[in-house]
Image (spheres, rainbow, N blue to C red):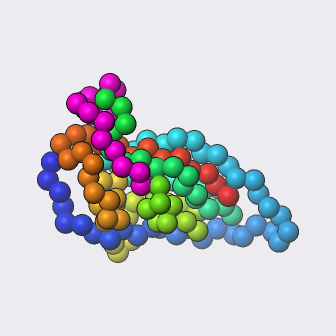
Amino acid sequence: MTKSPARSPSIETVTRPPTKKGKTRAPTAMGLQTTCEEQIMYANCPSGQTVRISNAVWGRTDTQSDICGPDAESKCSVDVTEELFNACKKNSACLSLNKKGNNLVAVEEFLDGLGVTDPCPNAFKYLEYTYTCK
């Protein structure tokens, strides 16, 4: 697998109308999401809410499944919760975009641009993340 040069990612900000003053919305649980290394990460919240990443792991956490490719010989993963939380905070949608913010890129390139090292260079990887909307 050939790596492309690291690019700094950006997050698309989608402007949504604010909630009415004095009204609060309960967080909306979006559940566990899985994005394969060559796919686009996409987290989206309803109008007036923002993406809150609560847990994110990059690599392979299961050696016995064919998630995003053949079984891996060993587990290899890294916690990327902080990186994703910071990249997505205050946005109602979180997409893996290139540095200029005008092209979608695969999640592998997006995380590389965030400074995340590849935990398993010769294995098919995926990003598992949980987010809520608040």
Which residue is farthest left? 2
Q: Visible in this render: residue 52? A: yes
Which residue is farthest right? 22
Q: Main secondary structure of the magenta part?
A: loop
- Rendered image quadrant of residue 75: top left
Which stretch did the figure color magenta?
64-80
Relative side of 83 to 100, left or right: right
Measured from the top left, where is residue 76 in percent x and y? 30, 41
Give the camera-side residue of 77 and 38.
Answer: 77
Give the camera-side residue of 54 and 21.
Answer: 54
Give the residue displayed 56% in from the left and 52% down from the top. 54
Vertical arrangement, residue 128 with respect to residue 24, above or below = above
Measured from the top left, where is residue 93 in percent x and y? 54, 60
76 in magenta:
yes
Give the residue displayed 28% in from the left and 57% down from the top. 117
78 in magenta:
yes
Give the residue displayed 46% in from the left and 65% down from the top. 87
Q: In the rendered image, which quarter contains the C terminus? A: bottom right
Callout count: 0
Measured from the top left, where is residue 49 in percent x and y? 66, 61
Q: Visible in this render: residue 42? A: no
Measured from the top left, where is residue 103 in percent x and y? 34, 65
Give the residue displayed 37% in from the left and 36% down from the top. 61
Give the camera-side residue of 88 and 58.
Answer: 58
Relative side of 62 to 2, left or right: right
